[in-house]
Amino acid sequence: MNRKNIILCGFMGCGKSTVGTLLSRKTGMSFIDLDNYIEKKEGKTISEIFQDSGEAYFRQLEREAAKELSKKNGLVIAAGGGTLTYPENAEAFRSTGRVVLLDIPVAVVSERLKNDTTRPLLNRPDKDKAIQELYEKRLPLYERAADIKVNADQSPMQVCTEIIASIS
């Protein structure tokens, strides 16, 4: 099986975009942040898509983008926090890539996202509770989708080095 892409998955704030950018530089592969990719195609931010058209519409855009990108090679893709909780997205990405879970403790997520207001699913007064509930729901799905699990509670460069060692 030809598996040429590297797909980063994990909870919001785990470092997918940061690590993806570094990984792209180190491997010479192109970096694509799935959320940014969708935003460019739609001409709206993720928050605006959620607000104007709802989560179901966003998830449909995400499925289409996953299918589209999985047909390409030589990409480092930072999947959105919810992308790989859907088996069809995981299957599409795994058909041409290795899925890497950037695993961090929920307490680290809460700390990293405490001042973040850009994530529609967390824009609630009980943000920490929302993070905890989503994290518990999503982690087993990430683990099921992933080929490789990496501790992301270390420097982005260390995470990047560990990923390269794991896929070589």
Image: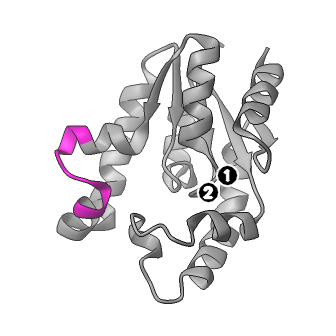
Q: Quadrant of residue 48?
A: bottom left
Helix, strand or loop at label 2? It is loop
Which label sits on residue 142?
Answer: 1
Mark 2 belongs to which amino acid?
Phe
- Mark 1 and mark 2 lie on one chain; the one further toward the N terminus is 2
Over which residues does the magenta segment extend? Answer: 40-48
Q: Position of residue 3 (x, y in %)?
A: 62, 17
The alpha-carbon separation of the residues under discs 1 and 2 comes to 8 Å
Which quadrant does the C terminus fall into? top right
Tag 1 and tag 2, C-beta contact below 8 Å: yes
| 35 relative position to 16: left or right | left
Which one is closest to the eye, mark 1 or mark 2? 2
Q: Which residue is mark 2?
A: 11
Tell me the quadrant of the picture where the N terminus can be found. Answer: top right
Label 1, residues with CA under 10 Å away: few <14, some 14-19, many ≥20: many
**x and y percentages locating residue 161 in the rendered image:** 78, 25
Q: Height in image: 135 above or below 82?
A: below
- Tell me the number on the disc at residue 122: none
Q: Residue at the location (43% across, 17% down)?
A: 72
Q: Is residue 166 above or below residue 115?
A: above
* Amino acid bearing label 1: Tyr
Displayed quadrant of residue 114? bottom right
Q: Report x, y in % for residue 99.
A: 65, 34
